[in-house]
Structure formats: structure tokens, C-alpha cells
Amino acid sequence: MQFTHLHGHSTFSFLEAIWTPKKLVAKAKEMWFSAIWITDFFAMYGAIQFYESAKENEIKPIIWVELGFVLDIHWMNKVEEIWNVCLLAKNTAWYQSLMKIVSIANQEWIAWKPKIDINTLWKNSDWIIAFMWGEDSRIWKMINRSENDDKILEIVGMIQEKLWKENVYFEIIAQDENLDPNLKKINSKILSMAKENEISLITWNIYNYINKQDKDAREMALAIKDNKRMFDSDRRKPIWEFYLMTGDEIKEILLWNGYDESDVDRRIAMNNKIADEIDTKINMWQWLFPKYQTPKDIAEIYDSVRDSLIAE
């Protein structure tokens, strides 16, 4: 079945994922995907390589970025209080806004984690789609800590007010809930909140490598990043499968978790609908230089020096 991944990383997420954008696109073509997304951490270094590769392979490229996110950028936030947000470039204008937002985020960081807040999004983009409910989101962490539903919905309401309700989505993670009881708890809570508050749902599994057998290679990359050895007991050992799954595999996992088939089909259709609405075109191979207006007093000095040199 047709399925569009909404969340995944390439080598430009710097040891959090493996495989280049080019190889990712090649795999997507092999799997007959009509569109593929890239949501690298904190920057868009791989966007152009990804865009060009997708165009060459006649696959729609959809460019995102995953940034640190706080409610108010002026508060002294601890690194553990920063949660993540995925932002989508829906068209060319949004892509330009996204680059500006990334630049702002990289001027405001804690422990090498760039961050933005609600007002940054509101001021720098008229329309933007945001997915905020994944594994590294504040909502995920609040549900995991069994915090009050009203407190969670208050934050959700703040985000919806700034970004418009139709541009904010809840996410169901398509992983085996039997491997992690917290996942079942969080997915169930997100489902009930979405239904009660008429919030659209999507689904994804987060791909960090292409093939299922690449799991060990990705774990080695994580160990290198964390300065650990593969035999260290405290190294990161992800229990889920983060490879580029087919639509049938995604559906099979969700049905295995006990979700209604019609609901699963509806969420998968929402993924595809969002992809169909994307139309980002990057005009390649052009020179783009900023235009600076020289201050009047500097211009007068320049003109004076130039005139004297000409006279000589």
C-alpha cells in the first residue's frame, strides 16, 4: 500500500542516523515511494543533495528540520527541558522561512542544542506545519510522567493558537508496543486527546537507517557519538526498529498493536494527503547575494575618496 514517511534522518543528523540522502532516495525509488521526507536534526545541510537526488529519481522531495523547542526562548531553560519540533517546508516561501528559523535557532542554544520558541515560529512564518508529539516532544514526556491532562492541553492550545489548529498534528508511533509499555500508554493517551479535541492524527516509525540489517551499524554510530564502546553496558541500545519500512509493514505493526483497521487506513491516508499538498521548488544554480544599503555618511566618505583618486 502507498505510504509516505513523515519523519526520518540521514547522515546529516551526525551519527544519529546512517546512509546519505542519495542512498535514501535510491531506496525510496526501489520501494516505489512517490514522496520521501527528510527531517535532520538542527540544520538543513543535506537538503540540497536530497532535493537534487529526489528530482533525478522523479520522487517528490519534502524538506523538514527537527529543532529544539521551548515555550519562551528568554527563559533559562535546562537542556532536559528542551523538547523537539519537526517543521515542514510546504512550498518555496516556507522553505525560505525555514532557513531563517534554523538560523535563529542556531543563535539560541543550550549544550549544543539549537532552540526556538512559539513566538519565533509565529513571527517568521505565516503558515507552517508542525509535528510536536514524538518521542522527544514535551507532550510525550508529560504523558510519560502522568501529568495532568488539562496541563498538557493548555500547552497544545497555546501552540494551536500561534500556528492555527489545522497545522498542528498528533502522531502515533508505529512500533511494537509490547517492547515498551510506555509506548502503549502514550499512544493511547494521544489517541484519546486527538478524538476529544478534533486533532488530526498521522503515523510514522522514524527511519534512521535504510535496511533492517543496518541496525548494528547505526548502534555503532551512536556509540561513537556518545564516546562509548560496543561492549559498554550503558551505551544506547534502541529496542525499536528504525529502518525505512513499507506501508504494509507500518500497517501490520499498528494492527498487531490492536488498532482498528479503518482508523489505521485513515491515518496512513492523512500522511499521503499532506505529502500531496507539498510543492517546494528550489531554483538551483543561481547566485544569491544580500543587498546592503550603504549608510549615507559612509557613502559620502567613499564618494569623496573616489573623486580624489580620479582627480589624481
Image (cartoon, rainbow, N blue to C red):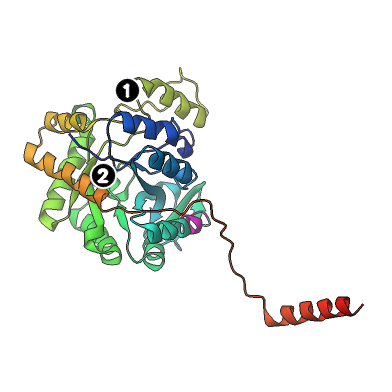
**Neighbour tally class for label 1: few under 14, some 14-19, many 20 plus, Cα within 10 Å:** few
Q: Mark 2 sits on what residue?
A: 145
Residue 292, compared with residue 116, is above or below; it is: below
**Rendering coords of residue 134 (x, y %):** 29, 44
Q: Work out which residue is located at the far right of the displayed protein and give it.
A: 312
Which residue range is magenta in the image?
A: 102-106
Q: Residue at x 28, y 30 (%)?
A: 31
Q: Secondary structure at mark 2?
A: loop
Spatial separation of the CA atoms under disc 1 and disc 2:
31 Å
**Rendering coords of residue 203 (x, y %):** 22, 41
Residue 150, compared with residue 46, is above or below; it is: below
Q: Residue at x 46, y 39 (%)?
A: 13
Magenta stretch, overall SS: helix
Q: How many marks?
A: 2
**Neighbour tally class for label 2: few under 14, some 14-19, many 20 plus, Cα within 10 Å:** few
Q: Would residue 198 be found to the left or right of residue 203 on screen?
A: left
Q: Residue at x 14, y 57 (%)?
A: 197
Specify the quadrant that holds the C terminus.
bottom right
Amino acid type at image mark 2: Arg
Q: Residue at x 36, y 62 (%)?
A: 118
Q: Mark 1 sits on what residue?
A: 212
Q: Would residue 20 be found to the left or right of residue 163 on screen?
A: right
Residue 155 visible somewhere in the drawing: yes
Q: Would residue 127 be found to the left or right of residue 1 on screen?
A: right
Residue 168, compared with residue 59, is above or below; it is: below
Q: Nearer the viewer, residue 304 or 164?
A: 304
Amino acid type at image mark 1: Lys
